[in-house]
Amino acid sequence: MKTILLFSFALLLTGLCAFTFATTSIGTSNVDNLVNSVAADVEKLANQVAFSDDGKPYLTKEFTLNGDGNLHVETSGGNITVVGGSGNQVKVEMFARLNGNRDSDKTEVKEELDKYDITIKQDGNTITATAKRKASFRSQRSHLSLSFSLYTPANMASQLETSGGNISLANLTGTQEAETSGGNITTENLKGNLSLETSGGNLTSTNVSGDVKMETSGGNIRLTKCHGKWNAQTSGGNIDVTDAQGELKVATSGGQINLKGMSGSLDARTSGGGIEADIVELGKYLTLETSGGSIEATIPGGKGLDLDLEGDRVKTTLNNFSGTSEKDRIVGKMNGGGIPVKMTTSGSTVVLNYR
């Protein structure tokens, strides 16, 4: 506990010093960039702390599998972490804290645990780890946070659910399903089909390939080096995609969309923000739509395109073009036609560049 307090104090001092330096040495115009950078680092550290306890687990169990495994994990308020590795062993660690305190008194923890049904068991190659509040205590406020950390073989499917904590999956192959009512979901180095859902947290995926569906009601979405077929939606956050390949459909009701190094088919829509897209290789189609922001895209040149560009003002270069070209609308074929390219905004500028 002392280590955590010292770390928190050091982090606070670092932030204050950075802010003072920013306002006195680099000028107030750059403070926003500094604050955003610090905020991103703090979020990353927070996720690391959430998923790597330095305290001892309250309970540990180990199992042996004889084939590809399956996990079912459920808790009512804590975090869930699953990390794949070599071998055929599964280790399940359960962490119990009163009000998030790592140094919870075990007597108090035991009293609270009596209000839960705890199940950690093996049935064939299926591992179950659940912590559910007993029916007679569900109307009472819970003072206990129960988190699970699982270390498994790489070939492992999972069904994970928590009512308020974060979920992290790494180094796995198989079908993964994860749902949280208010936390973040982080996935890294996964292969297989994914279904990820959070009611208010962020969704972050790095080096993930497969058929993926993800949804958040209010958080941001960040995808890096992701391959396959993706459907990602947020009701109010921003979407950032870097180095993605395959078929990507993204939508936000009110945020910005930034796409860098995209190869493949792309459909990106926002109801209130702008869109910037850097397309390395076109797929079967390119659709960019916003109700309130500007759109700027850069795509490979010399391709056969079916253009449909519309905005308050449309800016592009037309070579070997047949069709109609006006200030606010361009419809027609370039280089004989081919890949449909649709860019539409109802309230700003559309810019199409060629590399």
Image (cartoon, rainbow, N blue to C red):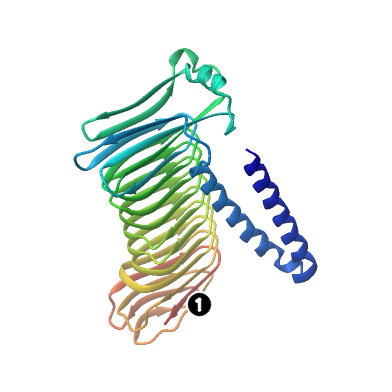
Q: Is residue 64 left or right of residue 129?
A: left
**Residue 141 visible in the shown view:** no
Vertical placement of 143 versus 167: above or below? above
Residue pointed to by mark 1 = 327
Vertical placement of 64 versus 46: above or below? above
Residue drawn at (56%, 51%) of the image: 45
**Residue 123 visible in the shown view:** yes
Residue farthest top in this picture:
136
The amino acid type, in three-letter code, at marker 1 is Lys
Within-10-Å neighbours for mark 1: few <14, some 14–19, many 20+: few
Residue farthest right in this picture:
24
Q: Is residue 40 left or right of residue 205?
A: right
Q: Viewer-proximal residue, 47 or 111?
A: 111
| Residue 83, percent from left and from top | 37, 46
Q: Name the element at disc 1.
A: loop
Quarter-of-image position of residue 354: bottom left
Residue drawn at (40%, 72%) of the image: 279
Quarter-of-image position of residue 198: top left
Which quarter shows the C terminus?
Answer: bottom left
Q: Viewer-proximal residue, 34 or 318?
A: 34
Vertical placement of 167 versus 191: above or below? above
Q: Is residue 229 left or right of residue 197?
A: left
Quarter-of-image position of residue 226: bottom left
Q: Viewer-proximal residue, 271 or 29?
A: 29
Residue drawn at (51%, 58%) of the image: 291
| Residue 91, percent from left and from top | 35, 37
Which quarter shows the N terminus?
Answer: top right
